[in-house]
Image (tube, rainbow, N blue to C red):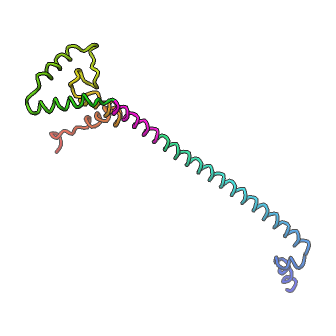
Amino acid sequence: MTSLYLTQLMTLPYLTLAICPGQAQSDVERAREDASIGSKHLEEQMVSFEKRRLHDIKTSMLDYFKIQLVFHAKAIEFYSKCFESMSMVDEERDLQEFQRKLSMARGVPDTEEISQALTSMTTTTNGYSDTLGSSDPYTSTYESTASDHRRSTMYGDDEDDDEDDDYYDDDEYDLSTAR
């Protein structure tokens, strides 16, 4: 029974170190190699993670800056169009139009204004007026072309909005069949 007990004790790892110093040395070397391989693998994973992190940060920041550049470019484009529209306003003609409408609101149009309007309507040089969106110099600057230009500048073209309107027109509900 004692021999069986001794063989079991010899198989225990802590006794192995005491019994076989050469084997203990090789176990230590193997443990060092495993630790070295593990630390190299961990270092590679850390480097790979850092590389992905830097790439993701760079991509995110580039996307952010691109969005900001597009936003500000559109803002500059919008403000440029607004500046052009405001530059095209003829203050004198607008003032004359205001005075004409004011006199018409009182119910007393000037005979001079009526004669000027009639002559300007018949004597346009090429069929087009030199005011924004009018056929004579006394028509409001804001009635047609200028307001349409400003509206399309602010809200974009309305030509492609017809598709959205058709969607709601097709979904009419017939109350006579509903019970």
Tell whether 141 sits left or right of 59: left
Which quadrant, please, contains the N terminus?
bottom right
Residue 15: image quadrant is bottom right
Tell whether 168 sits left or right of 60: left
Marks counted in the figure total 0
Tell whether 44 sits left or right of 137: right
Which quadrant, please, contains the C terminus?
top left
Specify start and end residues of the magenta stretch as a single range. 72-87
Residue at image x 72%, y 59%? 43
Residue at image x 59%, y 48%? 58
Which of 165/112 is in front? 112
Residue 57 position in % (x across, y down): 59, 51
Residue extending furthest left?
A: 107
Which of 169/109 is in front? 109
* Residue 99 counted in the magenta span: no
Residue 131 position in % (x across, y down): 28, 24
**Type of secondary structure dominating the magenta stretch:** helix
Residue extending furthest bottom?
A: 2
Residue 97: image quadrant is top left
Residue 78 position in % (x across, y down): 40, 37
Residue at image x 11%, y 25%? 110
The relative height of residue 119 versus residue 68 in the rendered view (above or below) is above
Residue 32 position in % (x across, y down): 82, 66
Residue at image x 56%, y 45%? 62
Residue 101: image quadrant is top left
